[in-house]
Amino acid sequence: MWPVVNQALNAVVDVLLWPVQGLGDIWQIIVLALPATVLALLVFRLVSNQDAIRRHKNRIKAYLLELLLYKDDLRVTLSAQRHILGHTMRYMGHALLPMAVMLLPFLLIMVQVESRFAFQGLEPGESTILAVAVDPEQQKIRQTAYRLELPPGIQLETPAVRMPASGEVAWRIRAGSPGQYTATITAGEHAIEKTIMVGAQYTRLAPSVYRADDFRTLGYPAEAALDDSQPLASATVEYRRARGEFAGLSSASWLLFLFSIIFGFALRGALGVTF
């Protein structure tokens, strides 16, 4: 299920970015922010009770005006504050569910932004860690011999290091010439593949891949999911971030969020949305 969602979103975003693929990252983020905002606003309008939201907002404004006009009358002031609080709570009740539903398509677009702009390929000569995690339910596989097969252009620096506590096996590798490579990790009779990008020009990549039945697959749409019938649960290559990071998100995602807010306020009237 999750790989199908990723494939569909990859196709949609590829089409949206095709006209601006030669432009800088910020323009591509703006292009993604506009349809994401329109979709979010339409979802909000469909799910929310727009009449109730307008009614409570208007009453909050009326009681705020009452506070301003009768600020010297304690009885009126306390009554207005009580009504403002009540209508604010009702307004939030009408807005929270639509906001939560609206966030779902927006978050999926944000995942696409992270997968395309947040990381960059390894620099030639750079060392990094390639690790696989074993399904905790597959106890037998923990004793299996692991083998890493690397293509020319990627060098192995250390043998496999087992971490029994976390169920991980890791290798240190070194990048060679720029290009896209495929490493093969074998555990007993089972084998998986992990793509390794070398070169700063590569930004659309997946630091981690998970099995197809793992919800976390949604977070890494740039690479095909692992077969869910084998015991290796994930494979990870440590890449450097291509830009600044805050609260676990790259600056690209924060720019998407900023432009979406701008577009949201600019387009809410045209789309007949009140929030």
Image: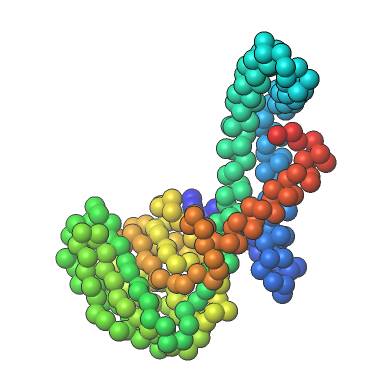
Q: Is residue 125 left or right of residue 62?
A: left
The outermost residue toward the front is 72
State left or right for residue 266 relative to residue 88.
Answer: right
Q: Is residue 83 visible?
A: no
Name the one closer to the observer, 180 or 269.
Answer: 269
- Residue at the spot x=70%, y=34% of the render? 275
- For the view shown, which residue lies furthest in the right direction? 270
Residue 62 placement (x, y as % from top left)? 76, 21
Tell me the quarter of the picture where residue 18 sits. Answer: bottom right
* Residue displayed at 22% across by 65% down: 163
Q: Residue at x 49, y 55 (%)?
A: 247
| Of the pair 85 and 110, the residue shown nearer to us | 85
Q: Is residue 149 above or below residue 190?
A: below
Task: Provide residue 83's location: percent of width, then percent of height.
Answer: 66, 16
Residue in the picture at 67% in, 36% down? 44
Q: Quadrant of residue 50?
A: top right
Q: Position of residue 204 (x, y in %)?
A: 56, 70
Picture coordinates of residue 221 (x, y %)? Answer: 52, 61
